[in-house]
Every structure is written in C-alpha cells, then in structure tokens.
Amino acid sequence: MQTSTRNELLLKRSLSAVWHPCTQMKQHETLPLIPVARAKGCWLYDFDGHRYLDAVSSWWVNLFGHGNPRINAALTDQLAQLEHVILAGFTHEPVVALSERLSQLTGGRLGHCFYASDGAAATEIALKMSFHYWRNSGRPEKTQFVSLAGSYHGETLGALAVTDVALFRDTYAPLLRTSARVPSPDWRLAEQGESARGFAIRCADALEQYLQQHHASTAALIVEPLVQGAVGMAMYDAEYLRRARALCDRYSVHLIADEIMVGFGRTGTMFAHEQAGITPDFLCLSKGITGGYLPLSVVLTTDTVYQAFYNDDAARGFLHSHSYTGNALACRAALATLDIFAQDGVIEANRARSAHLSEAASALASHPRVKNFRNTGMIWAFEVAAEDAGFPRRFYQQALARELLLRPIGNTIYFMPPYVISRDEAELLVNRTLGIIDAI
Ligand SMILES: Cc1ncc(COP(=O)(O)O)c(C=O)c1O
C-alpha cells in the first residue's frame, strides 16, 4: 500500500473509532489529524516520512526522546521477567527500587510512595489522603481545599474541583464540590514596577489572610510549584512557595506540591520545590516519571502522614486502589529514566541546553509582537499580540506546515522540548517560530 494511502486510511479509521482527548471532534472536518507511524528523538514521522519536531514533548511527558535505546532495553528486559502483578498483598523489585530511589531524591523526607497511573489520579490520592489524615488525627472538620487562581490539577471530578481553568471546568461545575482560590503569584499580573518577588510576597499575604479565616476547615493548599502549565505557563518566584510552606505550618494545613508537569528536571532542578528549599507534605509526580513511555503516577508523603494511617483498624488505613497500581513495566521505565538522570548529569547538562535555547531565542524575545518572554529551566513561553480568536488554530496549523508540533494556549506560545533537543534543532524551532509570527 502506498504510504500516503496509509496516512489517509489511518485518519479515516481514527475519526470513526477514536474519540480524541481535549478535542471538539467536529473541528477535524477542517483540521486534519496527524498520523504518526514512528518516532525517534525529538521527531515524529508519518507514513510518508513527513516529520514534526515534538516541541511539547507529547503533552509534557517525554524527557529523553522517542525510541530511547536505554529505556527500550530496560523494558525489553522487564518484559521477560514480569509485566504486572497485583500490588495489594504482593510486591516486586521495580516498585521497591523505584520507591527507594524517589525517596532518596527527596533526601528521605518523603519516604512513602503510593502509586496510580495518571496525573489526575495522583491529585485525587493527595486530596483524599490529606482529608483522611486530618480525620484520623481527630480533625474531621478539615474538609476543604484551596488552590491558586489559574491552577490545573487534572480532569477527574476531585481534581477538577481544585482546577481553575474555565474551559475545562465550567461545564461540569454542577458536579464539583466547592473549593477556594487564592491569587496566583504569576508575575505577568504584577503591578508596573513591582518585582516578581515583591508580587509573590503580596500574593502570599493574600494566602495568609485566607488561612487566618479558614484554616480550621482547610485540609490542604495545592499548588503547581514555579510554573502553572495549563493556564499558559504562568511563572512565579520561589519566595511564594517558601511563604506558603511557612503559612501551612503555622495554620496546620497540608501543602500539596503537584509536580506532575514540573517534576523531573523541567524547571532546572529535579523537583521544582527544591528551589524554595522546602518540602511539601505530599508530592504528586507523573508525566516525565517514565520518560514519557508508560502511564505512571505517584504520591510521596512523610512518616507523619503514613503513621496516622498505621493502625489495627482497617478503616483508618488508606483503602484506595487502582488495578494497575505500581505496574512493573512502568516502574522499570521510571528506573531507566532515573538512571539516565544519574549517568548523564542531566540537570547540569540542561543548564547549558537551556542557556543556548534562550540565547537563540533573543530575536523572539525582542520581537515587536512578542510580550512577556519567559523561561524557567526547560520551559519557554511568551504571548503574541493578535486580536482574533482564530489565532491559536492558525498558529498550530502554520507550525505543522513548518514541521513543528506546537500547541498554543490562547495567545501563549510555549516550548517544552525533550531534553535531548540538539543545538541545531533548538535553532530550527526558534527560527521557524519567528517565521510563523511574521507570517500570520
Ligand atoms: C500540573 C498538572 N497536574 C495534573 C495533571 C493531570 O495529569 P494527567 O493528564 O496525567 O491526568 C496535569 C496534566 O497536564 C498537570 O499539568
């Protein structure tokens, strides 16, 4: 069969059988789906050999490129031993080794790992565990959660209740339990002349006012440390996290760090909260944990939380489960991912990579239609001045025409490439993006 026919056939079958995520399916009457036949490094290829630079790391999951030989080898080896086993009453080497290594990465402060598969499930677990901790500790009235304006923590009902992105939330509002919002320290919202740090302090003051009033009923504050992704890569000063940690301690409220997007080196440190020198009570991880290979999420927590559940009474235990909890293949992919971090000095190497891309992007940063050019670690974002509502879609299509996979969020364009992006690829990404801005 000719390759272009294979492309077309796959698109047709996909549109009739697959309900694609986060998509108004009718738009595909005019916006073609992209078939992917194979992928290698930063590139996705269709059956005709057309290629697309995966500048969003396939929804922020891929770290070390598609078809990574080391992760492939680890998975092949694991397949020959054990693919999956129930984790209630049974255990296995990959899940134990992964838990030990994740705990070590937090300096042993978060020594207990509870697994699921998707990010949203990790959010649900952290929220339930926090509430249940307080209940087990004689504080059953702590039933409320507070999150930042513009926050995103996933699409399941509990996670959506603490999410603040209208497009995803509003339709389902009648199904969601109420939860509170406090101002986001997103520095784009600072007053003219106000520093990012100054604004972070002002927002922390607002959090303090909220907690002063509501701490008795509040179980936890949940935050995306340093970068709020889905609202448009809002970046903020680490001072906010330092102050939030101190306030949570003062008012007996848990701090949940949702590092599902920002974990595993995205912000320049292994975990984003490290940049504030704090430890959260719950750390939610997913996405990059398996290098972008397999669904896996985990909530890490403290001895204090763990001990509050440890009891003869079954109902005081955390009786939450998912069938694929601690899947052996996914854990093994995660171990291979951590090996790459350790063996290749990835955090250090990314500093040079990040500096090079930022330098290459100087013409973007100073472009007259570009506003708020910003960078944290391996994330870059900026707004493009455009009046019409069709801008994101036109930008997306123009990007595809130039071999780039970019998914604008409104007028925000962001780059979140795999860490294996080469200097040439980074320059291609920047130069072609400039070309799109000039063309539309
Ligand atoms: C910060 C954050 N939390 C939670 C999630 C939800 O993760 P998942 O899509 O795996 O359910 C996401 C996904 O983008 C995220 O960015």
Image: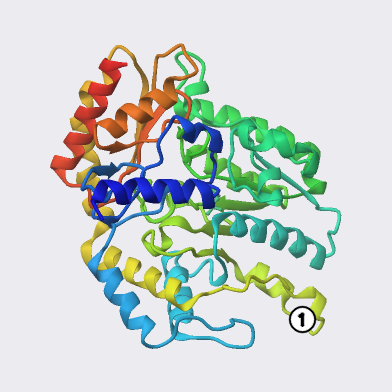
Where residue 175 sits: x, y (%)? 79, 44
For the residue marked with disc 1, what is the amino acid? Asn
Where residue 418 sits: x, y (%)? 30, 50
Question: For the residue carrying disc 1, how many other residues have a C-alpha within 10 Å: few (<14), some (14-19), or many (20+)?
Answer: few
Total marks placed: 1
Q: Is residue 98 visible?
A: yes
Which quadrant would the N terminus be assigned to in this image?
bottom left
Determine the residue positioned at 81% across, 63% down.
Answer: 135
| Quadrant in the picture for residue 52 | top left
Q: Nearer the viewer, residue 399 or 32?
A: 32
Q: Nearer the viewer, residue 113 or 164?
A: 164
| Quadrant in the picture for residue 146 | top right
Determine the residue positioned at 53% across, 74% down.
Answer: 326
Vertical position of residue 97 compared to residue 126: above or below? below
Which quadrant would the C terminus be assigned to in this image?
top left
Instruction: Classify mark 1: helix, strand or loop.
Output: loop
Q: Nearer the viewer, residue 164 or 305?
A: 164
Vertical position of residue 156 compared to residue 295: above or below? above
Determine the residue positioned at 25% across, 41% down.
Answer: 354
Q: Nearer the viewer, residue 434 or 178?
A: 434
Where residue 163 sits: x, y (%)? 64, 41
Where residue 366 sits: x, y (%)? 26, 17
Vertical position of residue 328 compared to residue 18: above or below? below
Residue 241 relative to residue 98: left or right: right
Q: Which residue is mark 1?
A: 311
